[in-house]
Amino acid sequence: MRFKYFFVFFIFFYSKALISQEYKGIKAPFLNSSNDSFKKGEWLKFRLHYGFFNASYASLSLEEEILKNEVIYKATAIGRTTGIARFFFKVDDIYETYFNKTHVKPLRSTRNISEGGYTKNVEINYDYLNNTANITDIKNSKLSSVSIQKNVQDLISTFYYLRNHFDIGNLKKNDFIKIIIFFDADNYDFKMQFLGLEDVETKFGVVNCFKFRPYIESGRVFKDSESLTLWVSNDRNKIPIKVKAGLRIGSIEADLEQFKGLKFPFKIKINE
């Protein structure tokens, strides 16, 4: 399973125009003004496992950097297989996204991956004056430009954008959420359903979470279009806690393994 699927797990919701959307007659909740849900120095690590078998680890870190004389955020996502899984399918992936701090607007994206012999090294620079993404294929020495939508997000910036603007107050059970993401020189539609609140057992204790059902394309990897379940912490941090995916054979889970640098206290339920 390519590392890009890991990040699909952590997409919460994206309204491309911040206006009312309808999906199958159900009004979708909107994004609100910034809630400032993260800060520089945040680091999250996730363990992906198939039953008791550890398949890989992935991490997300956030730091400040200067780009074109502007102080911005740089998010780095790293994924790699470990142990026996690495023997059968070696993965070493690095994704980087530079985005505007105020509006979480992607400015530059890089993708340097190695997955079982498949490699890719790409840099994307976003030109919002001309609504284009200028793509540099470093591996093949190719340049191209692709039209982008006005409020485009990339794979990694979406994670932070939605945490910052996720309107908890308007979210109701069974709401459908539509997402559009620019990835691999294309715009992708993505949708998911809010299933309510649920307590999740973690290594840190019991965490109350928002529960979502992302709808994905079934086929060689996933069992069916409703194979994914995502749990997000019901606090001001709004970080992924757990993901479960039904595969053609068995299921794979991703669990929050470690964290540091959260802006707000991580809420653990205490039994009285």
Image (cartoon, helix red, strand yellow):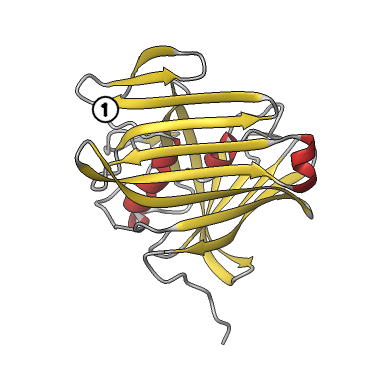
Relative side of 184 to 263, left or right: right
The x, y position of residue 225, in whole percent, is 63, 34
Q: Quadrant of the N terminus?
A: top right
The x, y position of residue 29, in whole percent, is 36, 46
* Snapshot quadrant of residue 123: top left
Q: Residue furthest bottom?
A: 272
Q: Residue at x 52, y 74 (%)?
A: 268
The x, y position of residue 16, in whole percent, is 32, 33
Q: Residue at x 37, y 65 (%)?
A: 263
- Does residue 14 appear in the picture of this structure? no
* Snapshot quadrant of residue 107: top left
Q: Camera-side residue: 199 or 35?
A: 35
Count of numbered circles in the view: 1
- Does residue 133 appear in the picture of this structure? yes
Residue denoted by label 1: 150
Q: Secondary structure at mark 1?
A: loop
Relative side of 259 to 219, left or right: left
Q: Residue at x 79, y 55 (%)?
A: 52
The x, y position of residue 77, in whole percent, is 50, 44
Q: As shown in the figure, which amino acid type bears the numbered disc 1?
A: Lys
Picture layout, residue 2 above or below residue 133: below
Relative side of 109 to 112, left or right: left
Picture layout, residue 84 above or below residue 145: below
Q: Quadrant of the C terminus?
A: bottom right
Mark 1 neighbour density, 10 Å: few (under 14) some (14–19) many (20 or more): few
Picture layout, residue 153 above or below residue 46: above
Q: Camera-side residue: 144 or 207?
A: 144
